[in-house]
Image (spheres, helix red, strand yellow):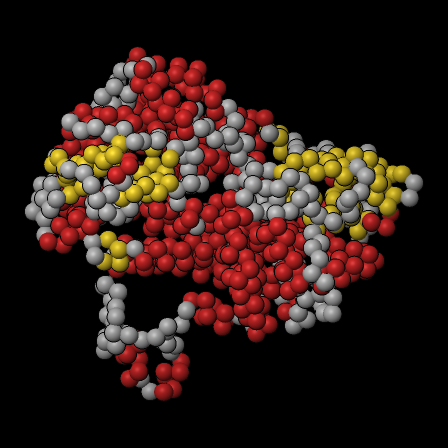
Amino acid sequence: MSESGQALEGFVAASSPLSTRTAFKGLGPTVRSLIPSDPESLWELDTQRLPAPHAAIRRRARTFAETVIAPVAMELDLAPQPPCGEMHPLMRQVLSKASKEGFMSDLGLPPPLGRASMRAGRNPVLAIAVKVEEFARACGGLMLNIMVPALGQSPILLSGDLHAYRRFLVPAYREMKAGEIHPFSFAITEPTAGSDVEEGHGASVYTPGMVAKRVDGGWSLSGRKRFIGAGDLSRTVSVFAALEGEGMESWTCFVVQPPTPGYTPLRKEHKLGMRASGTAEIELTDAFVPDENVVGGLRLGWALNRVTLNFSRIPVASMSVGFARAAMEIALEFAGRTSLGGKRLVDYQEVQLMLAQMVAETSAIRSMVWEQASVFVPRQGAASMTKLYCTDRALEVCNTAMDLMGNHSLLHANRVEKAWRDARLPIIFEGTNQINRLAVIEDMQEEVLSKCRP
Amino acid sequence: MNAASIATAEQFAIEVVAPLVERPEVVLPRADVVSLIEQAAGAGLTGAGVEPDALRALARVNGGVAFGVHRAALAARSCERLGLDGEAVSLTGHYGLGRDALPRLLAGRALPGQDVGLLTDYFDLTRARVVVGADWQSLIAAGFDGTSIVWRSLVRDECNVVVASDAHGFDELETTLVSSEKGSGVADTDAHVEAMYRDMLGMLAVATGLAEHALEIARAYAAQRRQGGQTIEGFPAVQQMLAQISATARAGIQQLAWFAAQPPDLEGLTELCAARSHFHPACCLATNNAIQVLGGRGYMQDFGPEKLARDANTLRVLAGTPVELQLFVAEMERAG
């Protein structure tokens, strides 16, 4: 960006003595150094706020998103989902490149196997969040396919079970380092239970659908899981099941590695958005899982499920920041290239107001994400409030962007309606925003109870 | 209100349209939409305009069919008034709603030079404008000659028509970018007031039908889906959403009753702009709430609410977004 004599209608040019750009130059050098006024892009200004390792991740992720994800995003959004177990060639290309770049192995293990930065490791959720925003800005579906492995790996990583690391993560990370695709999945949702597997009160009365029966040398799993990201492609699936005859408190995390007898992807969903990513319903019928595939220990599944959600909900909020930013940037480009009555749309005040609102909303939710992600693992209330607030606001930004573009927003080629469709999903998954509101209260329950009289 | 016409529409929607759109994820072929529009005309539904409650009844079953019927009827009514031929109608220009210049023109006020420039560009038919409706071979399009609205009758072959496949909503209909350098005009600014009034009234009716459809789906799901050991309709989190959908549908019904009884003049148009600037965002929220009540299923194409949300979004940005409608109303307030 450079100074010029040009100005938007309703504003003075940067060269005007009434512009802060020019007026501030009259201040002394010490004061000037304290008052930033040089033109900078919003993206650069935000990146400068990050710790150096995270800023580097953000730069690398943006380059990958713009050179690998964005070029195929619109085509994959329209392409029919391949049958269960098959992958679109363009998707394979993207995932292979993401794998080689270490974007699918940057959660847990440091080099030489993984790409987790030791310095960024102090804030692993922030590292994931800045990456997710860049990928989501380019394409929600592709972002999801690249990120789903992190979700599937999370219960294994968070178990602290070194045996599970060696058995499941190390071999997978070796493959990914070689550019192979090794999808992971996280399987909690059941056809009769979405919210009941995400909050304790519901779980306390829910009869589990996926049940593990004791057999020689291991467990036999039977039941269905629904809305499983990459569930038809995954080679390592964290399946949560109750022990036979027990309730949800017996939930245990079992690692299933398809293809294996008894594991059947039934169908893939037809979704409103994030269409490049496949979402499958899977059925397990007497699927044998050896004892060594129990992660963390028996009856620790509920804890691993909930801590995984605490870990993942802030990246979900961050993807909504990416969708909001995409919508805002698309609307800005449209307003800059479209004229009405001989003036650019950006010269009309009502358009400027909408742009400012979108910039402010996007900045606000990004700030919330980055602030709440600046701990090792966020606690439940922080993760849930960030997820629910940011995802709700991001959809509003998309609405505003569509308003700005008017009926041109309806055209697929103009991309903003895709941002809207993608932004709609995070309001639902990882717990609906209604369930996340209750999770906030659950996490502050003692404080609420302390206010109760008598 | 024509009770017989509304009863016919309800019967037509249930007996003829509903069996064709049972599966929300399957797009009704456009040839079927054309056929349905012809059948609706044959049943006397489109006449000299469609009863808003008849459109509502159709939209409770399928928003795209309802909008197609509405726009076809609007074209027929406009052609009748103007003495032109056209299967479709385009009232708005290439972007927006003519800001505050259009209400000044419609009110017969003196137009400053910048208004003339803006409206000339806004209605410039050489600039591609978005047209949504059933397949058409002829179109009447509003233009501007410097002092009046001028209507041009265009044949599709003489236009540059770019079909925008995979548009956001109204999957059953055709979304196109249309431009043309042809066509002779008939000047009639008052006809534009009437046409915009009828268009916005129809859009309000279709949006109301979408909200009613959303309520029907969400209510049925909430009554059978169990969580925490009970059906989810018992939770305030769900009740709040159902209530918002219900309130939107009820408000729409009341507004339709009011506007259906008003003459299609400039004052009525201003009131409609004001109503739409609030109602369409509410309708978008209502259809979104239906998605949310259904949770993950709501996001899937085979359950219905996601299509309602896309159709509601489409109505929100056609014939004036909330911001553009506000500019129209504000100018009329100032003129008054």
* Direction right: furthest residue: A216
Above or below, A101 against B278 in this view is below
Residue A335 lies in what quarter of the image? bottom left
Residue B5 position in % (x across, y down)? 30, 15
Residue B219 position in % (x across, y down)? 50, 27
Above or below, A29 against B325 in this view is below
Q: Residue at x 86, y 46 (%)?
A: A290
* Direction bottom: furthest residue: A29
Residue B159 lies in what quarter of the image? top left
Most foreground residue, A87 or A294: A87
Is residue A19 left or right of B301 when viewed as pictured?
Answer: left
| Residue B244 visible in the displayed image | no
Q: Residue at x 10, y 54 (%)?
A: B113
Most foreground residue, A279 or B259: A279
* Direction left: furthest residue: B110
Residue A202 lies in what quarter of the image? top right
Above or below, A170 against A32 in this view is above
Q: Residue at x 40, y 47 (%)?
A: A399
| Residue A121 visible in the displayed image | yes
Q: Quadrant of the N terminus of chain A?
A: bottom left
Residue A170 position in % (x across, y down)? 78, 61
Above or below, A289 against A390 in this view is above
* Direction top: furthest residue: B4
Q: Residue at x 30, y 24 (%)?
A: B52
Most foreground residue, A153 or A344: A344
Q: Quadrant of the C terminus of chain A?
A: top right
Residue A289 position in % (x across, y down)? 83, 44
